[in-house]
Image: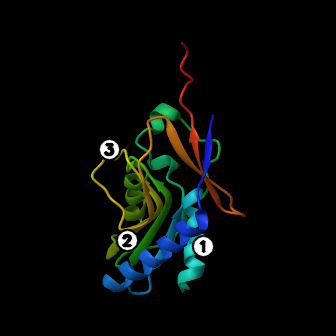
Amino acid sequence: MTIEQIDIANLLNNLEVSLRKESAARALNNPVMIGIHTGGAWVAEEMHRRLAIKEPLALLDISFYRDDFSRIGMNPKVKTSSLPLTLEGRDIILIDDVFYTGRTIRAALNEVFDYGRPEQVLLAVLIERDGRQVPLRPDCVGNNMTLPAGDRIKLTGPRPLGCVIQNVREPEYA
């Protein structure tokens, strides 16, 4: 297995700049920032601090909303969601670490809408990689990557926050 280090500080800076620009362009009003457990929550903590969001940071665990729940069963590391009682009419900044197929975000939006219909949702991710399977795309991105099949991006942390690319392909035998 080979591991390539990623410059996390640069990705966080890029994401912050993108979030500031898009938040201003969309005139977000007193937004609620929601981080998706686990890596997205770590990124959201940093962005929440950098952007000085007034509302408390909200956290979301999408385990029960996943479309593969019946295949993978109960995740032993299920975390609790911590959201305002209602998100009706609110501006939302939804944060995740890696956007890959789009299925995590689809599940997150389903849970968010169970708390009310937001005014708008801005989606921000630290890394967007190739491989979309549903018609969703982030608004703000720290970096875009194209990776070979079998490579995966893993956020490590929370302190220090880091990111690695792991090659999990099976070795080829002659």
Amino acid under label 2? Leu
Q: CA distance from mark 1 to mark 3?
A: 28 Å
Q: Quick check: marks 3 and 2 in contact, CB under 8 Å?
A: no
Q: Quick check: marks 1 and 3 in contact, CB under 8 Å?
A: no
Answer above or below: position of 120 versus 24.
above
**Residue holding disc 3:** 133
- Residue extending farthest to the front is 174
Answer above or below: position of 98 versus 89.
above
Mark 3 or 2, nearer chain start: 2
Q: Residue at x 49, y 76 (%)?
A: 16
- Residue extending farthest to the right is 159
Answer above or below: position of 9 versus 30.
above
> In this rendering, would 29 be left or right of 44?
left
Q: Which numbered dot is residue 46?
A: 1
Mark 2 or 1, nearer chain start: 1
**Mark 3 closeness class: few <14, some 14–19, many ≥20 residues within 10 Å:** few
Quarter of the rendering containing residue 167: top right
Q: Nearer the viewer, mark 2 or mark 1?
A: 1
Secondary structure under tag 1 reads helix
Amino acid under label 1? Glu
